[in-house]
Image: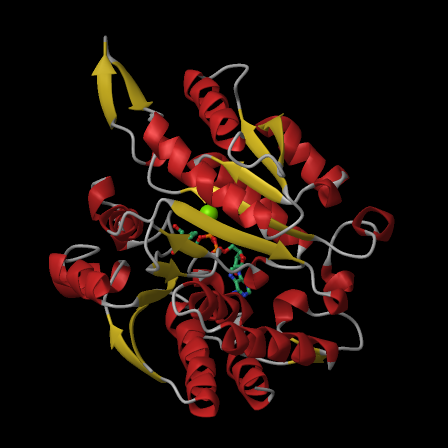
């Protein structure tokens, strides 16, 4: 089969990790007889430098016409970069928000899974992590604070800034359905995380999620306040199966969950709409501090490519092949610096990609 993949290498470590994921996809293609055709699309800082905007209409169109999008990361040093001394809608991350909105990618699926061989890289005590950690965060991605109206003004000589958090019933329902569908294939538990003791949007969230839950009688629904959830994640992370939450809470909680898996360089993600189309990207950013050094961990991006094969292309055994290869490489003791442990073999970005390819 032929597949059209729009690739967005982006900024910082983006080009390095996307290159490794493409290498792995090509190996899978060779072995299983598929053709993955890539079209590179500019987004973020590199698009600003080339076109003056973080995402052009043409770039969005190319992404729309593809079968799936593979993304590295965008952005630079926030405090110290020419890309940030401009209006928010002209910054690199605006490209990311625009493509999510433009493709209606309302559900961000982030599996947080601790490989057995990485137990040493997990900062939690052995008795807390027990024999493993395996959960999925379903984060609403096109609503909430990141998309609400915002402005800065001066009132009576004092500067003030406003952000708004808006959710409609429809936005909550569609992402809740995704979470329950995922839970049905797992341990059948959804923990819906909100701040219903304070926020009206959270009260609506809770009501709509409870309605959706009625269609999934086999799934246990639990509600949890976000501050408690932040604590529970480090105190008793194994209680979770699927966490369903709004945009900003999901952003924060998934970085927290990623550390339990050893490194943010391990956390893959899929951003989905109601069709088979998806955008696949690591959960981390462009890591400008380590860009260009061939030390970034490419595994989150490679596992995101595996998610693409599984969700968008229904290529389950091919996705399994990638995941098995990652497991083998870790079991053999190869580590990038972010997951390095005593008596392990440290490798760079390129070598990690090669080792995974060799095991497919
Ligand atoms: P970050 O995720 O880029 O980096 C946080 C820390 O994790 C850094 O110390 C970095 O070196 C390390 N790290 C990240 N990915 C790694 C990998 N694959 N292997 C090894 N270490 C890794 O977050 P930060 O520093 O807050 O943001 C940097 C830039 O990325 C900013 O411009 C930010 O806006 C942007 N960003 C972009 C995202 C995206 O494109 N989806 C998501 C998050 C941030
Ligand atoms: Mg984030």
State the image coordinates of residue 74 (x, y, percent, origin top left). 35, 58
Q: Is residue 74 left or right of residue 53?
A: right
Residue at point 77%, 49% (across, down): 124
Image quadrant holding the N terminus, namely bottom left
The reply to whether residue 10 is visible in this rendering is no
- Relative depth, front residue between 131 and 282: 131
How many numbered circles does the render carry?
Answer: 0
The reply to whether residue 146 is visible in this rendering is yes
Q: Is residue 289 left or right of residue 273?
A: right
Q: Is residue 340 left or right of residue 37?
A: right
Q: Is residue 39 left or right of residue 221?
A: left
Residue at point 50%, 40% (across, down): 250
**Visual colour scheme:** secondary structure
Q: Residue furthest right?
A: 127
In the displayed structure, 183 sits above or below 168; it is below
In the displayed structure, 279 sits above or below 344; it is above
Image quadrant holding the C terminus, namely bottom right
State the image coordinates of residue 186 (x, y, percent, origin top left). 63, 51
- Relative depth, front residue between 73 and 185: 185
In the displayed structure, 346 sits above or below 215; it is below
Residue at point 25%, 24% (across, down): 152
Q: Residue furthest top?
A: 156
State the image coordinates of residue 17 (x, y, percent, origin top left). 45, 72
Quarter of the figure with residue 217: top right
- Relative depth, front residue between 224 and 173: 173
State the image coordinates of residue 65 (x, y, percent, origin top left). 20, 65
Residue at point 54%, 77% (across, down): 317
In the displayed structure, 182 sits above or below 196; it is below
């Amino acid at each position: 089969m032929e597949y059209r993949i729009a690739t967005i290498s982006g900024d910082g470590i983006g080009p390095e990790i996307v290159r490794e994921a493409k290498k792995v996809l090509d190996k899978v293609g060779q072995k299983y007889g598929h053709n993955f055709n890539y079209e590179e699309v500019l987004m973020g800082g590199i698009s600003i430098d080339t076109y003056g905007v973080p995402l052009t209409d043409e770039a969005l169109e190319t992404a729309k016409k593809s079968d799936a999008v593979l993304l590295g990361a965008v952005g630079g040093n926030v405090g110290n970069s020419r890309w940030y001394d401009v209006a928010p809608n002209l910054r690199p991350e605006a490209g990311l928000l625009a493509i999510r909105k433009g493709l209606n990618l309302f559900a961000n699926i982030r599996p947080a899974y601790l490989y057995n061989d990485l137990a040493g890289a997990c900062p939690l005590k052995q008795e807390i992590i027990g024999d493993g950690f395996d959960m999925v965060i379903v984060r609403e991605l096109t609503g909430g604070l990141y998309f609400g109206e915002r402005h800065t003004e001066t009132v009576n000589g004092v500067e003030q800034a406003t952000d708004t958090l808006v959710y409609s019933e429809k936005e909550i329902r569609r992402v809740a359905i995704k979470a329950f569908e995922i839970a049905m294939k797992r341990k059948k538990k959804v923990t819906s995380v909100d701040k219903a003791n304070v926020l009206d949007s959270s009260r609506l969230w809770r009501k709509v999620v409870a309605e959706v839950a009625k269609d999934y009688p086999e799934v246990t629904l639990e509600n949890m306040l976000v501050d408690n959830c932040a604590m529970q994640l480090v105190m008793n992370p194994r209680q979770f199966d699927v966490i369903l939450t709004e945009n900003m809470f999901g952003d924060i909680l998934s970085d927290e969950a990623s550390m339990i898996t050893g490194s943010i360089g391990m956390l893959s993600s899929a951003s989905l709409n109601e069709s088979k189309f998806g955008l696949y990207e690591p959960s981390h950013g462009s890591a400008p501090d380590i860009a260009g050094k061939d030390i970034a961990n490419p595994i989150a991006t490679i596992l995101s490519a595996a998610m693409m094969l599984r969700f968008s292309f229904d290529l389950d055994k091919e996705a399994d092949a990638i995941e098995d290869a990652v497991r083998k490489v870790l079991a053999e003791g190869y580590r990038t610096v972010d997951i390095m442990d005593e008596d392990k073999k440290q490798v760079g970005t390129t070598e990690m990609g090669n080792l995974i390819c060799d095991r497919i």
